[in-house]
Image (spheres, rainbow, N blue to C red):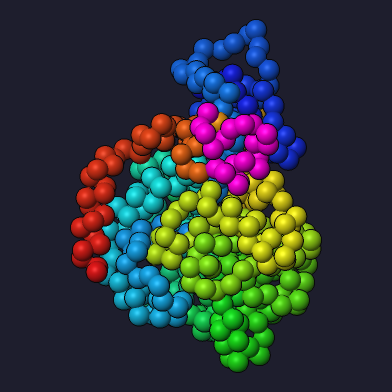
Amino acid sequence: MIRFYNGRVMSFQNGVEISDSEVWTDGALISYVGAKRDDMPQFEREIDLNGDLLIPGFKNAHTHSAMTALRSMADDMPLDRWLFEQILPREAKLTDDMVYVLTKLAIMEYLSSGITSCFDMYFHNEAYVKAIIDSGFRTVICSSMNNYDKDYTAIEGEYLRYNSCNERVSYMLGIHAEYTTCIERMEYMAGLIEKYKSPMFAHSSETKSEVLGCIERHGVTPTVLFDKLGMYNYGGGGIHCVHMSDEDIEIFKRRKLWAVLNPASNLKLASGIAPVERFIKEGIGLAIGTDGAASNNALDMFREMYLVTALAKYRESDASACDADKVLQMACVGGARAMGLNDCDCIAAGKKADLTVINLSRPNMRPLNNISKNIVYAGSKENVRLTMVNGAVLYENGEFFIGEDAAKLYAEADKIAETIR
């Protein structure tokens, strides 16, 4: 058992309220949240928070982890050229061994940003899962069906395998995007969704040209197309959701779909600004993702949170739009629920011990006028003191505990980059 004491706890059971509770973990679970007790058990470790804040970890609700190889390799160009001329040809050179190393590198970056799980859409999933398991991290894989798959029917086997291989790994159905997936393959995906009653996610409405192209090909927007095919019969959502029509938003509201926001990537690729305040007013569930390091280029939840609220204010010409407290909940709670990680959404007895300690004893956190808003508006990775996943401390005070030497991983990643450049 591990004891966190002498600090602050933002459990998210009642919004961003803060208590002075203790939190105990027992194995993978939180076993107690409350005041100090006389009947204290034997702890293997007691962590004095010294006034710092304990939160349920951030959830990176959309990423491509192994894209760390492509960080700053194909920048400053529009999305279509970036993807088809620079990214896809280099991705074709990646091997299982490369993806294993690159995923571990991404995990280190997640942990140092207080992220305890990620919603990953990529390939070489066997190597990816091995890296997740070996590191102690948590993931939900989203299938990325597209026209480049040699055997797209293999997704069903992956769905069954990765939903039963490890307690920290699960799998959800999805396609890469409408513009990379033919109608026959989307219809096959719709059949799997109906068979397994699974939610479905896809890159959707990221750019104006994507939406116009879909209308030209199918007569409707991507959201309407997915809904007509039955792909949203059991929930899920869209990734990016920048250029949404009134009909798209009505479908999201009716189907209780999630919009996963990726503001840094959307800005860097000049894709646009999502209608976040409209989503909030319509009651649409929101989560936040970093996207991959090839398009962002940082896997940093603090930067994403700031951009979600700041861009919403700019888009609406309203400084009161998109309250920072809502954004913090998107990052911690919304992401968990979008990913189906309902046992990771708050700090309570019986929930998973996926926790992050925010260091409040740094200049950017003082004075303590409003801690929740300060995390969003002033926080940075320097404030992440500790990240725990499934009851195990994987990052603390700048050190990683993922079964791998950091310097060795950096060197291997550099070699991979040379190979695919």
Residue 7 can be seen, yes or no: yes
Residue 64 drawn at (x, y percent)? 44, 61
Q: Is residue 285 above or below residue 191?
A: above
| Left or right of residue 381, residue 20 in this image | right
Residue 29 sits in quarter: top right
Q: Is residue 192 visible?
A: no
On screen, residue 407 above or below 212 = above
Q: Is residue 214 above or below residue 69?
A: below
Count of numbered labels shown in the rendering: 0
Q: Is residue 371 magenta?
A: yes
Q: Nearer the viewer, residue 41 or 303?
A: 303
Q: Residue at x 68, y 67 (%)?
A: 315
Q: Residue at x 72, y 34 (%)?
A: 17
Name the image quarter holding residue 317. Answer: bottom right
Residue in the image at 51% along x and 32% along y? 362
Location of residue 308 (image quadrant): bottom right
The residue at the point 67 percent across, 86 percent down is: 220
Q: Give above or below for 187 relative to 397.
A: below
Q: Which of the image's four quarters has the C terminus?
A: bottom left
- The residue lying toward the viewer, choosing from 200 and 258, is 258
Q: Which residues are magenta?
A: 361-379
- Name the residue nearer the viewer: 385 or 155: 385
On whether residue 111 falls in the magenta region, the answer is no
Q: Is residue 244 left or right of residue 94?
A: right
Q: How far across and how far down the image is residue 240, in percent? A: 58, 67
* Percent of width and height locating residue 73: 32, 67
